[in-house]
């Protein structure tokens, strides 16, 4: 839990409020996109675990008018321009994949350029359990990406560092031409989160 006093000193939190982003995590995606060049104009992007919508805001800005963003979360997301919003639990992989395919067809699209996941489990306070739940979410995101990405598509997913991290990293590495791990400057210093970036879906 982040203390209110810490938020008042948090430059990214204050910047998000000032610039109209729904969450400070928007800057994590901005930093990832700038470093790894994973999003292009006109791209189709699926944002998993998207609530409250900070990453979807960034993705929408980066893909431009010709692009498409589909946001998926188990919780409702407030309307965000022309972003397509789906209420689905990404742990129900087949249901989520089907819902996204229907949304794509409705927009005259049939392939996805980038799948994002900043999903985080509800924290229990048990470090090992939280790490495992993070791994489960990341693995579900990878399964959805594997079903939807076009060849040479890209993938970004958050996972908590721990005993399952290497297993997940290797799973991504098997499916992508280039795989990297990255901690954006916008991640809190005490956070155990890391982002695994896969480029060039095989």
Image (tube, rainbow, N blue to C red):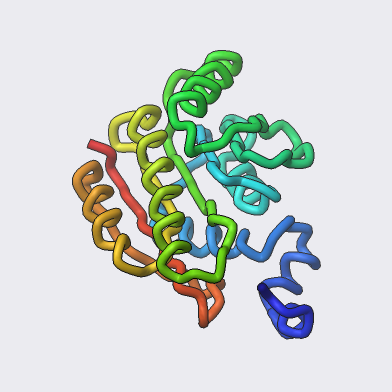
Q: Is residue 190 above or below residue 180?
A: below
Question: Which residue is painted at 36% across and 36% down in the image?
Answer: 143
The structure residue drawn at horizontal position 54% and vertical position 63%, both measured from the top left corner, is: 28
**Height in image: 12 above or below 151?**
below
Quadrant of the image for the C terminus?
top left
Number of callouts: 0
**Residue that appears at 48% across and 32% down:** 92
Residue 63 sits in quarter: top right
In the image, 12: left or right of 34? Answer: right
Picture coordinates of residue 105, whole percent (x, y) = 53, 14
Residue 76's image quarter?
top right
**Where residue 195 appears, x then y in whole percent?**
41, 61
Residue 147 screen position, x and y as percent: 36, 28
Residue 21: give x, y in percent of width and height: 73, 57
Q: Is residue 164 left or right of residue 33?
A: left
Residue lying at 74% horizontally and 78% vertically, measured from the top left: 7
Rendering quarter of residue 134: bottom left
- The residue lying toward the viewer, choosing from 3 and 40, is 3
User: Looking at the rendering, in which quadrant would you find the N terminus?
Assistant: bottom right
Foreground pick, 36 / 8:
8
32 with respect to 149 (left or right): right
> Is 52 above or below relative to 164?
above
Q: Is residue 122 above or below residue 183?
A: above
């Amino acid at each position: 839990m982040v203390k209110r006093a810490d938020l008042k000193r948090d430059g990214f939190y204050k910047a998000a409020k000032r610039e109209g982003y729904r969450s400070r995590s928007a800057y994590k995606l901005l930093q990832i996109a700038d470093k790894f060049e994973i999003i292009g104009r006109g791209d189709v992007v699926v944002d998993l675990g998207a609530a409250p919508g900070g990453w979807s805001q960034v993705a929408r800005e980066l893909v431009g008018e010709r692009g498409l963003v589909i946001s998926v979360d188990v919780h409702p997301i407030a309307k965000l321009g022309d972003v397509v919003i789906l209420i689905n639990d990404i742990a129900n992989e087949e249901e989520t994949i089907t819902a996204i395919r229907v949304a794509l067809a409705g927009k005259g699209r049939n392939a996805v350029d980038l799948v994002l996941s900043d999903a985080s489990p509800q924290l229990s306070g048990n470090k090992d359990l939280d790490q495992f739940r993070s791994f489960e979410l990341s693995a579900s995101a990878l399964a959805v990406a594997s079903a939807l990405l076009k060849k040479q598509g890209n993938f970004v997913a958050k996972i908590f560092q721990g005993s399952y991290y290497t297993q997940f990293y290797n799973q991504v590495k098997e499916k992508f031409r280039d795989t990297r791990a990255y901690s954006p400057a916008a991640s809190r210093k005490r956070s155990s989160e890391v982002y695994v970036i896969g480029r060039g879906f095989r």
